[in-house]
Amino acid sequence: MEEFNTLMSFVPNLESTSVLQLGVNQDLTQALVNNKVTKVVVVDSDRQKLNAVKSQSSANVQFLDQNMNQIILDDQKFDFVFFNSLLLNSTDEQFVQVIANALNNLTDGGYLFFRESCIGSSQSSRTPITLIDLVQAKEHEENGKKYGFDLVFAKPNRSFSTNEQNADKVSFLFKKIVLENHHGFKTLKEFMDHKQYSRNGVLRYEKIFGEGFVSTGGIDTTLEFLEVLDLKPNQKVLDVGCGIGGGNFLMADKYGVECLAMDLSSNMVGIAWERAQAHNNSKTQFEIGDICKQKFPDNYFDVIYSRDTILHIDDKEGLFAKFKKWLKPNGKIFISDYCCGPKPWSPEFETYVAGRGYDLRTPAEYGQIFVNLGYRNVKAMDRTDLFVRSLQNELKKMEQIKDEFIKEFSEEDFNYLVNGWKAKLQRTAAGHQRWGTFYCEK
């Protein structure tokens, strides 16, 4: 019961909403009632289970004896669909049918929440990435619009609970959205996972940046930047855009901090989850999620850290306002990020930025956001010189490991990276592409 109450704190406000619950689970039902929902409709084909809980339930809980793969609800729509450990013995086809029904039964902007065993589970062959792909593959036509699910988070049970019995479970929250075109993909997450940050693309980056790292300068810049933060044991750190986890394991091992590491890319976090098996004593937990859609308590984190990630986010002002709420008094922020020079830009740079979907600011403009939001001790630095040195060193490394790289990946992959690094150097030389670091305190 306590775990479900905790889980409810991660989802949007449930008060005065309607909920469709698939499968009898008295603890889940009670947690929903405790959150002041208007109505819960519980669907299960096991009549014995339904009868056993009916007498113990509140007046706003209704029960339907139906097969969950063939739910008939007429025109009823719900704000939330919940289920827990429902699909362990189902086929992919049955799982997808449940998802299709949920998409149809939800209101616009409604949420699907479920928890299933899928990390290191001997009972399930499905990984969290498999489940996410199955959910997001489903589409639904309604009123001339095409709807699908956008991932809000995939949160391992072990990141908030010490209950070993449920250690292999992951909680998923999806939002029903109108599907839009993100550079040929349905969502930003799909664009990132299938284009810029495919699994092969991530591992190519790691080969250049060093084991565990996928951002400029690898471990060298990470060590330099972490020194600025003066981290202390047991401090809580939020890493936004954590990549494959090298920096997080380093933070936890070197400084003893508790690190919540989040990235929108399933491929990135999937690799981090794999690597975490070798770091059993680490205080780092990894989640797949869109930072713009997360809920955290006020005054919760000591440090918020991000490396070359927020360039993907247009509403930096809104995000940094949330950071300020989540930080403890005197909490610190450190960010490195891609920036730009003043306009006008060259046509080539315009095409590059548009093709990647980046939102770039000059280092001064970026720093001014923190000033405008009332942060203290703001230090916005143009570190393009360090960026250029790192690119040059990484190009030298590519040439040194060329044969090894081509054997592990391909000559096409090698040429793609070399050309990409050279193009960055050309853009920085022209003054269009810049790289900044940003420090401030609440």
Image: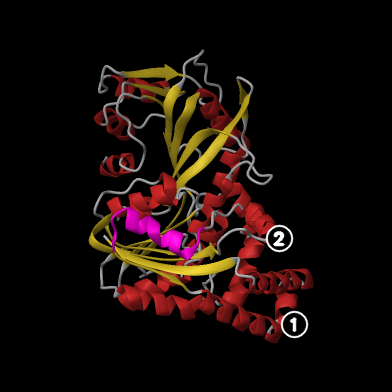
Q: Residue at x 25, y 68 (%)?
A: 234
* Quadrant occupied by the N terminus: top left
* Colour treatment of the image: secondary structure
Depth check: give the residue in front, 52 or 118: 118
In percent of width and height, residue 212 lies at 51, 72
The rendered magenta stretch, by its main secondary structure, is classed as helix
* Residue 29 to residue 173: above or below: above
Labels 2 & 1 near each other (Cβ < 8 A) = no
Depth check: give the residue in front, 399 or 281: 399
Depth check: give the residue in front, 44 or 212: 212
Mark 2 residue crowding within 10 angstroms, few (<14) / some (14–19) / many (20+): few
* Residue 72 to residue 155: above or below: above
Q: Secondary structure at mark 2?
A: helix
In percent of width and height, residue 270 lies at 53, 58
In percent of width and height, residue 122 lies at 50, 54
Q: Secondary structure at mark 1?
A: helix
Q: Which residue is mark 2?
A: 348
Q: Residue furthest top?
A: 74
Residue 290 appears left or right of 95: left
* Quadrant occupied by the C terminus: bottom left
Task: Tell me which amino acid carries mark 2.
Answer: Glu
Q: Residue at x 69, y 74 (%)?
A: 422
Q: Would you say residue 370 sits in the magenta stretch? A: yes
Depth check: give the residue in front, 9 or 170: 9
The earlier-in-sequence mark between 2 and 1 is 2
In percent of width and height, residue 426 lies at 67, 72
Q: Residue at x 54, y 29 (%)?
A: 103
Q: Residue furthest bottom?
A: 400
Say the numbered circle drawn on residue 403.
1
Q: Which residues are magenta?
A: 361-376
Say the numbered circle drawn on residue 390.
none
Residue 213 appears left or right of 240: right
